[in-house]
Amino acid sequence: MNRPSFLDELKRRKVVRVAIVYGAVAWAVLQVADIVLPALALPETILTGLVVVLALGFPVALGLAWAFDVTPEGVRRADQPATSDEAGTADAPTPAHQWVGGRTLVVAGALVVIAYIAGRVTVRPGDAGLDRMAVAVLPFEARGGVDDVGFVAGVHDDILTQLSRIDALRVTSRTSVEAYRETTKNVREIAAELGVGSILEGGVQRAPGRVRINMQLIDGATDEHLWAETFDRELTAENIFAIQSEIARAVAQALEATLTADDEADLAAVPTRDLEALDLYHRARQLIDDLRSATNLEAVRVLEQALARDPGFVAAWRELTRARSWLIRQGEESDTLPSRQAMERTVGLAPGSVDAALAEGYYLYYARGDYRAALAAFRRAAAGQSGDADLSFAVANVVRRLGAWDEATELYNEVVRREPRNGRAYYDVGWQHKLFRDWDEAEAAYRRFQELMPEEDVVVADLIDVALGARGDTAGARALVGQWDEVEDGEGVAAVYSAQLMYFHRDRRALAVPVPASARADVTFSLYTMYPDGPVDLWRARQAWILGDTAMAQTLGDALEAEYVAATPTLSPGSNVIPEGRDLFGIRAGQLLLRAWALLFHGRDQEARRVADQAVELFSWDDDASGDGTAVVRQRMLIRVLTGDPDGAMQDLKELLSRPGFTTVWELRLDPIYDPLRGRADFQEIVVGR
């Protein structure tokens, strides 16, 4: 007996017929869907679902056709032998086998139904890869004109903060949403870019004695309005906070988020009943975010005005702690007593609150440099404001200063995963990789930062570091310097001079590069950071020294030392003296290093080395692992190189290369400052062997 061929078996089981009919039905369904769905304003995800399920259903239909057959007696396995009656009538098609075949219709019809259901299901945010509990609050439209921009920004900040304190929600930071202030992108595009399932947008209008706020919550996957409401009330501080609380509750309800007792307490709070104090607070918040000395000093003044009107305004005390502590961190003030008093008022007014924990964190981090205690405070705040990515960012910064590098990397990566549009997070990720000399990863992060925040030109300096540190690419560094038309950041200018020094070598053109007055005047900023080797005029003095222009080096060195000494703040009567004589943030160490350089330029080598040793004793990597301490040791190493202490210099150099930091092998190869070490075998082993 001859066994039928595989092709004959396919024909007998009508698999080919099912394949043809399935394809025809699927094509017809998609054609109809392509016309009907837009007309009904249904989301495109339904069509996507149809395509996916029909594609997945094709092999299923073929399998069913191979395995089963539909006969007048019912459904049976296709491999069962036919009865004699069936065999005699095999060539005469039954109604169930005409053209499309009964089983073909059943399979195709079932799959169309499945596809339709799947298409409907795909519109749900969770199935589309978007978490509906992840919320982005887009910048609100100021519908009252330019005069209301500050007020509207304040309302936006407050609502964002309210939502971030609801445990069930994850709220995108203001940094990430700011890029969409005047966007033409639709909600689905924004939601996809931010990785959120829900979008809150709206506008605020303030008129004499009235405030009008309209809000709408939109499903990020379907563009469906989940909730919308307009609030039109008398303009009072109580009404502003009441509206904000109602909005937060409505968002939580629309997303089916459970509010805890703590959430309800936060939403019921009225931070201040003084409308002018609230306006002053909002203005100060914008000033503090600028992170410059002048704006922080102005913020302190504005917050003190707000607190004079309402001494019980907890959030204002918290921000005053932040502003005053940041002035200590910048070296603008030495007296930590005012920041401690502001912190204590915050804690006293709201013990155990998120505001109290934040105030403690700001004070301990910026004013006292007590990173372990600051970390504990920020983690308490993060527990009460779990939806705030900026707090995760703060925790990562502190962890890095403590030298917990792996944990810091994980925290930064978590912020980036949560906030794919947060440029500042990418900058810190790049900084982390640069410290570890992971150049490809650093460059990728910096490029992403540049893409997201093109107005921030300081990243050019970091890209210069990458070009030189990774490849010794002097041509690429020169091109980057040429792209930087207006350099205003003191730290950035120092990095540019680093590049100049390396690719000009002993060329006097490095001294001819103009330095913006704003960068040279930024004394206190470079005073405590010393990244990578101090202020701009120190670069110029060093370059002059290498080129043999001793007079210029001495003039710049002496002026720089005098300028920094004059810039040192004086402790006021009754000040809170730094505990145990600690050199917070390397400010005193930075002054000593400038003194050491001035001595070097005058040929007083032994004194220069002694003063540099004092600086390292005051502040090094044990005080701050993230870069500041490393920078102080690095400067001592350079001073040792130029003052005839090669053994000491090599000891520092080997230690620097064993830790995360700024010193790179390509720098050792290119920078003429290392010429005194080039004859040493151990130096050549480092340069050639790495």
Image (cartoon, rainbow, N blue to C red):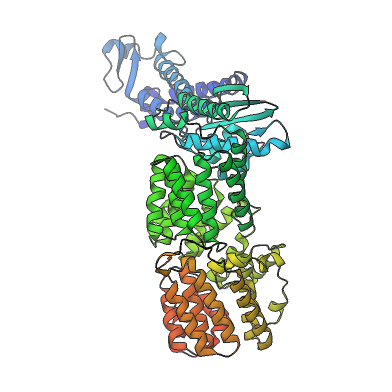
Quarter holding residue 466: bottom right
Counting from the top left corner in percent of width and height, residue 476 is at 63, 68
Q: Residue 607, percent across and down?
A: 51, 87
Nearest the camera: 291 or 250?
Answer: 291
Left or right of residue 502: residue 1: left
**Viewer-side residue, 434 vs 227:** 227
Residue 386 seen in the figure:
no
Single out the residue that lies furthest toward the front: 573
Q: Quadrant of the N terminus?
A: top left
User: In the rendering, at what x and y percent does residue 126 appear?
Assistant: 44, 31
Which quarter of the figure is the C terminus placed in? bottom left
Would residue 275 appear left or right of 608 to someone viewing this image? right
Determine whether, in the image, residue 450 is placed left or right of residue 429. right
Q: Is residue 74 above or below residue 348?
A: above
Count of picture labels:
0
- Seen from the viewer's position, the closer of residues 78 and 201 is 201
> Which of the 4 image quadrants contains residue 82?
top left
The residue sitting at 68% across, 38% down in the picture is 149
- Residue 290 in view here: yes
Question: What percent of the width, then of the height, locates residue 345?
Answer: 46, 46
Question: Vertical placement of 102 versus 509: above or below?
Answer: above
Height in image: 437 above or below 76?
Answer: below
